[in-house]
Image: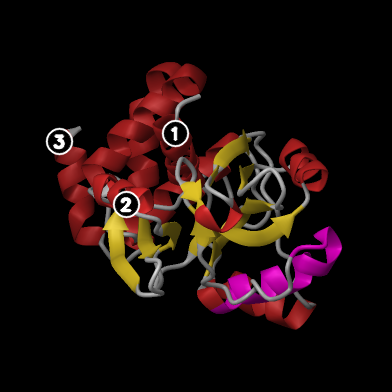
Amino acid sequence: MKAQQHTQGMLSWWELAGVGRVDLAARRQCGTMIWHNDRGLGELGLGWARAENVRGGEVYVRPARGYPWPVVFLDDVTVPRATRIARKYDALVVETSPAGGCHVWLSCSWALDEDARHQAQRWLAPLVEADPGSTSGEHLGRLAGFKNWKRNGSWVNVLEASRRGRSWTPRWTEPDRQRRLAHLSPTHGDGAGEHTACRDTSESGREWGWACGLIEAGHDPQGVYERLVEHARPRRDKDAERYARRTVKRALERAGRADHAKGVLLRS
């Protein structure tokens, strides 16, 4: 697989996991960090990043700060352990170098704000022997398809990009968990009962979380609707359009963008 395919593979997995906006950064050899913050996945300036990388810059990426995202980051996980995680959960495994460990982006059952991601990372790091110093909730990871100059120019590659239909559910203490559920408890995207996002690991539940993540990140509702129709059609056949309209409408209402819902219905 070529370098650009590794990059696109990483970004495509993020998009399917519900990450719609990212921060891109390059650390030059002099130590200066150059930032491209809060960019959509299609507007990252990858050509600029490759030019920085060719000149010896280290290229990093993370889900954009200021939004809740349904992924958590784990640093310096061994290849065997990272692979086992990806075989059990939806996870992206990025090998930073043959001699080093892996970055693991673990899909979560619902979107977590930065503080919640920090708590999740602190809880997970000892269990998988990840780097405890990379648990800030906003830590940068390396972007696949670029060279790691700290490791003699080794390529950063995607090893696993699993979509097994099983997200990791954060295990908070019960009072905190209940408080977060009260704040993050949308109904099921298909209207089939009061399923909360933390419990619903069905295909519809994951699509609901994906739609909410993109809508909250400011994506065009019509585009979210069209992609959801395409993704759901093999499973829902003739009902895919109705299902997608209902899901996007509820995601817009949840995000406080109910005024956009009518436009989606009219154009579909």
Residue 190 seen in the current view: no
Q: Residue at x 63, y 53 (%)?
A: 103
Q: Position of residue 74 (x, y in %)?
A: 67, 60
Q: How is the image coloured?
A: secondary structure
Crowding at label 1, few (<14), some or many (≥20) Cα neighbours within 10 Å? some
- Answer with the quarter of the image where residue 21 lies: bottom left
Mark 3, mark 2: which one is toward the viewer?
2
Mark 1, mark 3: which one is toward the viewer?
1
Q: Residue at x 47, y 22 (%)?
A: 236
Q: Which residue is mark 2?
A: 49
Of callouts 3 and 2, the N-terminal one: 2
Question: Left or right of 127: which side holds 222?
Answer: left
Residue 35 seen in the current view: yes
Of callouts 1 and 3, the N-terminal one: 1
Q: Are the residues at dot 1 and dot 3 in contact (C-beta closer than 8 Å)?
A: no
Of callouts 2 and 1, the N-terminal one: 1
Q: Which residue is mark 3?
A: 267
